[in-house]
Structures are given as C-alpha cells and as structure tokens.
Amino acid sequence: MKVPALSRGAWLLGGLLWLVATAAGFALLARHALTPGETREAPSSWPSSAHPPRAEGRPTLVMLAHPRCPCTRASLGELSVLMEHARGQLDARVLFLQPEGTSSDWTQGPLWRAAAAIPGVTVLADMGGEQARGFGVATSGHSLFYDAAGRLRFSGGLTGARGHRGDNPGRDAVEALLREAGRVGGSSEHAVYGCALEEPPEARATNTP
C-alpha cells in the first residue's frame, strides 16, 4: 500500500526532531561532565588546624568529599590507582562532609566504604565542613598534595571529567611529585569535577547531588 506523501513527511519530520533532541541531550551531558566545580585558594603550608596532624617527613594527600556525590566514585577510583602506584610512599586521607544535625549514617554510606577499602587511606568525617573550610575546598573530590616538608605542591581533582576514570593531568601530576620526592619547586593545579560540598539544610536528609 502506498504511504501518503503527508504521512512520509510527518515521519521524516518526527525523525529529524528526535535526532535534534538526542544530539542536544548528549551536548548537555557532555557540557555538564566537562564543567569544573568551584575552586578556592588552598593554604600554601599544611594548616595547623587540620586534624589529625600529618606525619612529619612524609607526603600527605587530602581529599575532601561529599558522601552522596556520584562524581566522587570516579575520584576514589583514581585515588585507588594512585595509592597502588605510590607503593607506601604516600599518606592519604579522605574527609567526608557530615553536616550539622546529621548522624553518621548520613555520611558513612557506599562512598565511605569504598574509600575505606583503599589500602593506605584513612577515612574521617568532616563535622560541619570545618576541615573543608580550613583547606579552602568547596568541591567534592578536590585533593591537596603536601610534600614531606608540609608545602602545598598540588591542588585539584584526580579525574578528567565528572564521573570519568582514566589517565588525566591531575593524577599524573601527583605521581610525578612522588617520583621527584625531595625536589623543591612550585605547585600545580588541575580542575575539580564534582558536586558542591555545601549542603542546603532542607536537602540534608534525602538529597543526592
């Protein structure tokens, strides 16, 4: 049976609109994945207010994280690779946000357990975001590398996009610093891809960024 010309035109128009909508959706997803979070200036030396204090004479990496940020799973994956490559040369801690008025159950979920499973990583709760403010961090997954003398050598993320694992400039920079242990130099930075650490009070109980 012959399909009327009008019907064929409608099918073609519908198909074209579907393709345009699909392309626009992928473009929005890609834009979101490649949009970095907010970064602030981190202390150039290990802050005295940080708890617990770092081990003298050893480099330390600190990652500030939101326990309900899906992007942070990739950051933890890259941290796991980094710690494997470090071969015991690096102390690392992940500080998970625990907003005021919430219980440990709010913080100690799947991401907490994933971080705790990484050899050489200490996982702690950041009560009220006090440690994040002390380190000048506003985005989940932001990592700070301080050398054995307590000097800031790297500030940024360990992924190349939101929720994406794989080789990237952030992890490469930290691994290069470990290989060059003892050398005095400046600090490097990399964009951070993750959710905002600040949690609106009304969303604390149920929100998943």
Image (spheres, rainbow, N blue to C red):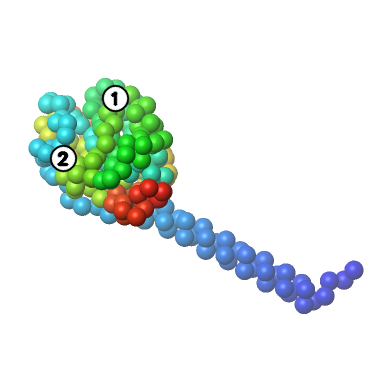
Q: Is residue 192 left or right of residue 48?
A: right
Percent x, y for residue 15?
A: 67, 66
User: Which residue is painted at 24% across and 27% down in the image?
Assistant: 90
List the residue tagged with mark 1. Answer: 120
User: Which residue is painted at 26% across and 33% down in the image?
Assistant: 124
Kind of element beneath mark 2: strand
Give yes or no for contact between labels 1 and 2 (Cβ–Cβ under 8 Å).
no
Instruction: Name which residue type carries label 1.
Output: Gly
Instruction: Name which residue type carries label 2.
Output: Leu
Q: Residue furthest bottom?
A: 6
Residue 151 visible in the picture: no
Residue 101 visible in the picture: yes
Q: Residue furthest top?
A: 88
Foreground pick, 154 / 61 = 61
Percent x, y for residue 176?
A: 25, 34
Foreground pick, 68 / 56 = 68
Q: Is residue 176 left or right of residue 70?
A: left
Kind of element beneath mark 1: loop
List the residue tagged with mark 2. Answer: 152
Percent x, y for residue 209?
A: 39, 50
The numbered mark, 1 or 2, whose residue comes first in the sequence reads: 1
Disc 1 crowd rating (10 Å Cα; few below 14, some 14-19, many 20+) is some
User: Which residue is painted at 40% across and 50% down in the image?
Assistant: 207
Disc 2 crowd rating (10 Å Cα; few below 14, some 14-19, many 20+) is many
Residues at marks 1 and 2, CA–CA distance in whole angstroms? 20 Å
Foreground pick, 5 / 194 = 194
User: Which residue is painted at 55% across and 61% down in the image?
Assistant: 23
- Which quadrant is the N terminus positioned in? bottom right
Above or below, 124 against 25 in this view is: above
Percent x, y for residue 134?
A: 16, 45
Above or below, 199 against 116 in this view is: below
